[in-house]
Image (cartoon, rainbow, N blue to C red):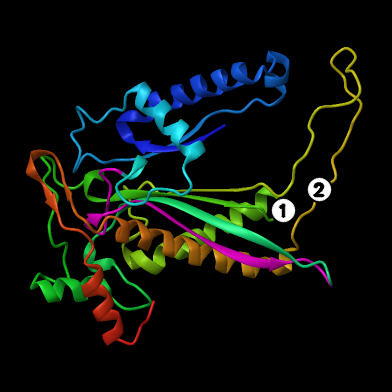
Amino acid sequence: MPIALTNSTSFGTVFQQIWEWTLKNARDKGTSLETMSHNYGTPIVAETADWWLNDVHAAGLKPETIQEAFANALNQEEVLEGQNGGGAGMTCHMFPGGTGTSSRVVKGGEGSEGVEYTVGVLCQSNYGHTHDMQIGGVPIGKLVLKEKGSPVHMPETPKETEVKGGKADDGSIVIILITDAPMLPHQLVRLSRHCAVGLTQVGGHGVGTNFSGDIILSLSTGNKTNERVLNTPKNGISVIESNDIKIIKNESMDTMFRAASEATEEAILNSLVAGRGGRVGHKGIKLDGFPVELVGELLEKYRVLV
């Protein structure tokens, strides 16, 4: 069952198209309805609002476009970052943002059983003002504003809205973390909280505002269990059966916490770097791209090399 990220006006259409894709995929594979019922899932769709750059009255995706995206996702070798996919039209710290990815590989195992686990993060960034942005502890947003001769301690370019305040000025971010480390739900909740730590490494004090819709989802593929019972239920009553699973030890979670935080931070920055070409939105709104070269010079000046 796919997890999909999109814009606000396409939420319902994407949800329905996941069902369409799932049913067609099952038919093409000859999967019976009985088997499908044992592997039932509900589509997961998250959204961020792109109505500053995109026309809210014309931004709804067509079903055929969504199906094409699903087909491409199965064949492409890498995730297209920045203003691609659900990230099209999204802004991050007043620059084109959108889709960003990053990962970390951590060592696991006991004794001679050396294994490696991957912590992968995909984000859809659509939040923040420039003056809140930081990289490596350097207030890079304020330094960029200073270089441009813009006010440093206030929002630099208020979004044009008919009503003062509201969600249009706050934005949001969706963060998806997937790992092959064997973890239980309560451990994944803890891991999600450390994605938020990574978010603050870029957004500083400007994240988590009242209208901000920040969503973090973490899941593990580390345990492949068989949920079908071997005994036939009688009168609706089944004989209790169980699965054996592995879980990582809580005392070794710190490594996962750091990986989640670092990968989230880098995914957000990658969404900005990928959008450095700029974006022209509806009504002629022009958004300059993230000034990668200038930021590199400022980081080197303040002795932060990334």
**In terms of depth relative to the viewer, which is nearer, 200 or 162?**
200
Q: Position of residue 303 (x, y in %)?
A: 33, 87
Q: Secondary structure at mark 2?
A: loop
Against 144, residue 2 (above or below) is above
Q: For the point 45% across and 64% down, which residue is it? A: 198
Query: In the image, what residue type sits under mark 1?
Result: Pro
Residue farthest along the top direction in this orientation: 235
Give the quadrant of residue 294: bottom left
Q: For the point 72% across and 53% down, which residue is it? A: 182
Against 115, residue 149 (above or below) is below
Q: Position of residue 189 (x, y in %)?
A: 60, 52
Is residue 100 covered in magenta? yes
- Report whether 154 appears left or right of 135: left
Is residue 57 covered in magenta? no
- Report whether 16 appears left or right of 55: right
Label for residue 182? Answer: 1
Quadrant in which the C terminus appears: bottom left
**Dominant secondary structure of the residues highlighted in magenta in the image:** strand
Against 98, residue 269 (above or below) is below
Q: Position of residue 196 (x, y in %)?
A: 47, 60
Give the quadrant of residue 28: top right
Q: Which residues are magenta?
A: 88-111
Q: For the point 84% across and 40% down, which residue is it? A: 243
Which residue does the numbered mark 2 point to in the structure image?
A: 245
Q: Secondary structure at mark 1?
A: loop
Quadrant in which the N terminus appears: top right
Q: Residues within 10 Å of mark 2 (few under 14, many from 20)?
A: few
Query: In the image, what residue type sits under mark 2?
Result: Ile
**In terms of depth relative to the viewer, which is nearer, 304 or 256?**
304
Contact flag, marks 1 and 2 (Cβ < 8 Å)? yes
